[in-house]
Image: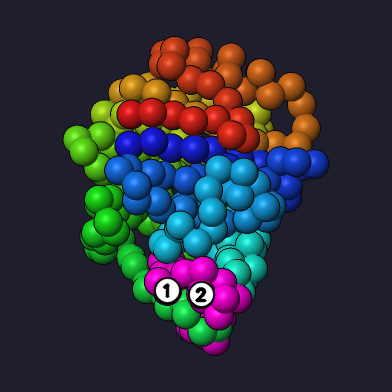
């Protein structure tokens, strides 16, 4: 199983730096987690859009889903041009507005999930945990070929996340704020909390994502590593993790 970081900025994209998007592949099957601002353009550096038929959205803040609208029309046009014949399946938290948006465009369909769902998408088994965030948001665990990836998406720290991410081969944890800041109100984690999650979950490799647009990002890594897990690094656009 491989995981390619497409984008990792929080809130809005930087120049040539998309928001949340992660491409998972295994034996020729591809799955996209989140499709935030700037993801669709960057994604095409690594794969043809027609070769991805499944997109899982963690929640409906623009930095995690805004490019899905363009993806729907990509599938519409490319189907009409006979470049693809498979519909685009979009998975997300139950939401009537999102379902209408997806299904208003031909050749796409919407499938909802919740914390009790288990989705079998190609070789990937996806399970979910509800987060602490201003809108309904889920962490995702993806298991394949004996390996596991946990993506927290956006959330305040919670002990439930430690259990959910336990012994993961790759933990992609949000790290929106620096140590000493307060993320409780906005539903985000500091570098200290991300480090505690990394240590207590015993994750084998950790990427800090949903990065802030201010400060020295290296300070996030230093702070997170102080909590005891040394296998922590910043997510970077284009980074490829092989599991």
Q: Secondary structure at mark 2?
A: loop
> Can you give x and y, in whole percent of width and height, for residue 82 in the image?
51, 75
Q: Residue at x 57, y 76 (%)?
A: 81
Q: Which residues are magenta?
A: 77-104
Instruction: Please check the rendered image and state whether residue 212 is part of the magenta-colored stretch, yes or no.
Output: no
Residue lying at 34% horizontally and 47% vertically, measured from the top left: 28
| Residue 156 in sight | no
- Left or right, 156 with respect to 130, comes to right
Q: Residue furthest front?
A: 82
Say whether marks 2 and 1 touch (CB < 8 Å): yes
Image quadrant in which you'd find residue 218: top right
Task: Decide if residue 69 is on the left or right side of residue 111.
Answer: right
Picture quadrant where residue 230 is located? top left
Name the element at disc 1.
Answer: loop
Whole-Å distance between the Cαs marked 2 and 1?
A: 7 Å
* Residue position for label 1: 85
Q: Position of 22 compared to 91: left or right?
A: right
Quarter location, residue 134: bottom right
Q: Is residue 92 above or below residue 34?
A: below
Which mark lies nearer to you, 2 or 1? 2
Residue 236, how many percent across, how many down? 61, 30
> Label 2: which residue?
82
Q: Nearer the viewer, residue 112 or 241?
A: 241
Residue 232 disc label: none
**Which residue shows up at 41% across the image and 44% down it?**
24
Total numbered badges shown on the rendered structure = 2
Residue nearest the viewer, comparing 107 with 134: 107
Tell me which residue sits at (64%, 63%) in the image: 66
Q: Position of residue 173 (x, y in %)?
A: 48, 36
Mark 2, other Cα within 10 Å: few <14 / some 14–19 / many ≥20: few
């Amino acid at each position: 199983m491989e995981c390619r970081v497409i984008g990792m900025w929080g809130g809005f994209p930087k120049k040539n730096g998309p928001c949340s998007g992660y491409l998972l592949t295994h034996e020729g099957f591809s799955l996209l987690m989140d499709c935030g601002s700037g993801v669709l353009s960057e994604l095409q550096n690594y794969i043809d859009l027609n070769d991805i038929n499944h997109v899982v959205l963690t929640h409906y803040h623009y930095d995690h889903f805004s490019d899905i609208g363009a993806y729907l029309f990509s599938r519409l046009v490319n189907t009409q041009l006979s470049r693809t014949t498979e519909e685009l399946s979009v998975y997300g938290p139950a939401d009537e507005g999102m379902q209408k948006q997806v299904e208003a465009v031909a050749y796409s369909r919407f499938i909802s999930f919740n914390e009790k769902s288990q989705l079998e998408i190609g070789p990937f088994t996806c399970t979910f945990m509800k987060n602490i965030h201003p809108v309904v948001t889920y962490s995702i665990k993806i298991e394949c070929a004996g390996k596991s990836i946990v993506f927290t998406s956006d959330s305040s720290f919670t002990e439930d996340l430690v259990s959910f991410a336990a012994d993961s081969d790759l933990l992609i944890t949000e790290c929106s704020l620096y140590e000493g800041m307060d993320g409780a109100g906005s539903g985000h984690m500091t570098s200290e909390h991300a480090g505690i999650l990394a240590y207590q979950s015993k994750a084998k490799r950790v990427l800090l994502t949903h990065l802030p647009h201010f400060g020295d990002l290296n300070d996030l890594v230093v702070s997170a590593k102080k909590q005891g897990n040394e296998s922590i690094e910043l997510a970077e656009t284009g980074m490829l993790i092989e599991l």
